[in-house]
Amino acid sequence: MKKYNIAILGATGAVGQEMLKVLQERNFPVNNLKLLASKRSAGTVIEFNGKEYTIEETKEDSFENIDIVLCAAENDVSEKFTPIAVKAGAIVVDNSSAFRMREDVPLVIPEVNAEDVKNHNGIIANPNCSTTIALTAVNELNKYGKIKRMIVSTFQAVSGAGINGIKELEQQVKDISSGKEAKINTFQHQIAYNVIPQIGSFDEEGYSQEEMKLQIEGRKILHNPDLKVNCTCVRVPVYRSHSESITLETEKEITVEKAKELLSKAPGVKLIDDLDNSMYPMPLYASDQDLIYVGRVRKDISSENSLVLWCCGDQVRKGAATNAVQIAEVLVKENLV
Ligand code: A2P
C-alpha cells in the first residue's frame, strides 16, 4: 500500500496531539512524519507508532516533499504557512477558520459532503466544531426531508477554549472550595458553577461569530444557500464534548419514528434514546470517541414539519482532529494525492 509524507502543523497543541493519536488509531498509511510547531517547542520529542520524533520550528522550507499537511494551528499561523505549503506541492487540511469560506476551498464533513474534496485547489477546510457536530447529527434527516431552518443552542465545553479553559475551571473549583476568590482570565466571567452565554465577540445585531458559523458554514456544506440558522452559543463548566439542542424545520414532514430509523443508520451517529431508562447523550460519555450521540428525538409541539433533538460530540476529535484525518483518508481513497 502506498504511504504518504505527513506534516502536522501545530503538533504540540490540543488538536495537533489528537491528530497524532487518530492517525495511529486509524492506521493511516504514514511514510515520513514531520511535526511542526513554534520555535518554543522545537526539540521536544514525541512518540508516534513506537518511534521518536523531534518537533521542528515551522519555517518556509518545512513543507518540501510533504504530501499532506494537517494544520492544527491558529488562523494567523495557517494564513502564513498554508500558501507556502501548497506552493511546495502539499495538500493542506486546515482546521483553522482562515480559508473556510473561500470559494475555491471545499469545507468538508466526510459523512456529509465527501465528494466536495475533489474540487480542492490545495486547501481543504475543516468546519467549526459545533457545525461538524450538528451537521453530522442531522445529515440523514436533511437528505430525507431537506432542512429549511434550525434553531440551535450549544453547550460548549471549556476545552474548546484550549488548555487554559480547562485550567481555569479546575482552578476556580479548587479556589472556591477553599474559600478563595475565583480568578478570571480566559472567560468573560467565572465559569465554575456558572454558564456564560458568550463565545467570542458580538456583532451589531448581537450575535457572536461562533453563532453565525453554523448558518454560514452550514449553507456551504449542505449546498443550501437558503438554510436559516438561529444559534445561541453557551460556555458550560464541562471539560470536554459539546452538546447541542437542535430544532429543525424540514420541507417534507419527518415523523419521529422515521427520524429515529434514519438516525439509527446514519454514518458517524449513534442513537441513544431510551427515555424509560433515562438514556440520552451526555458530554461525559461522548468524550474521547468519534461518534456524534443523538437522542431526545421528538416532535416540535409548537410548529409543523419540525423536530427537536439533542446531540453531543467530542469537539477535539470529530469536531477537529478526526474530521481532518477522515478528509485525508478521502484524499487517499479517491487517489487525489
Ligand atoms: P507551540 O506549542 O510551539 O506554541 P493550541 O491552539 O492548542 O494552543 O495549539 C496551537 C499550535 O500552534 C501549537 O502546536 C503551537 O506551537 C502552534 N503554533 C503557535 N504559533 C506558531 C508559529 N508561529 N509557528 C508554528 N506553529 C505555531
Image (cartoon, rainbow, N blue to C red):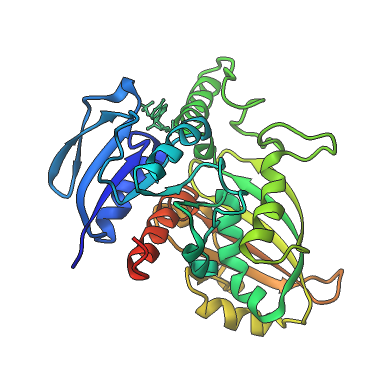
- Relative image position of residue 227 (x, y in whole percent): 75, 63
- Relative image position of residue 280 (x, y in whole percent): 56, 65
* Quadrant in the rendering for residue 140: bottom right
Residue at 60% from the left image edge and 70% from the top image edge: 139
Q: Foreground: 3 or 161?
A: 3
- Image quadrant holding the C terminus, namely bottom left
Q: Is residue 22 left or right of residue 286?
A: left
Q: Quadrant of ligand 1?
A: top left
Q: Is residue 246 left or right of residue 25?
A: right
Q: Is residue 313 above or below residue 299?
A: above
- Relative image position of residue 327 (x, y in whole percent): 42, 60
- Image quadrant holding the N terminus, namely bottom left
Q: Foreground: 301 or 55?
A: 55
Q: Is residue 43 left or right of residue 148?
A: left
* Residue 280 visible, this orientation: no
- Relative image position of residue 302 (x, y in whole percent): 87, 68
Q: Is residue 292 above or below residue 5?
A: below
Residue at 61% from the left image edge and 60% from the top image edge: 134
* Residue 333 visible, this orientation: yes
Residue at 30% from the left image edge and 43% from the top image edge: 7
Q: Is residue 7 above or below residue 188?
A: below
Q: Foreground: 238 or 203?
A: 203
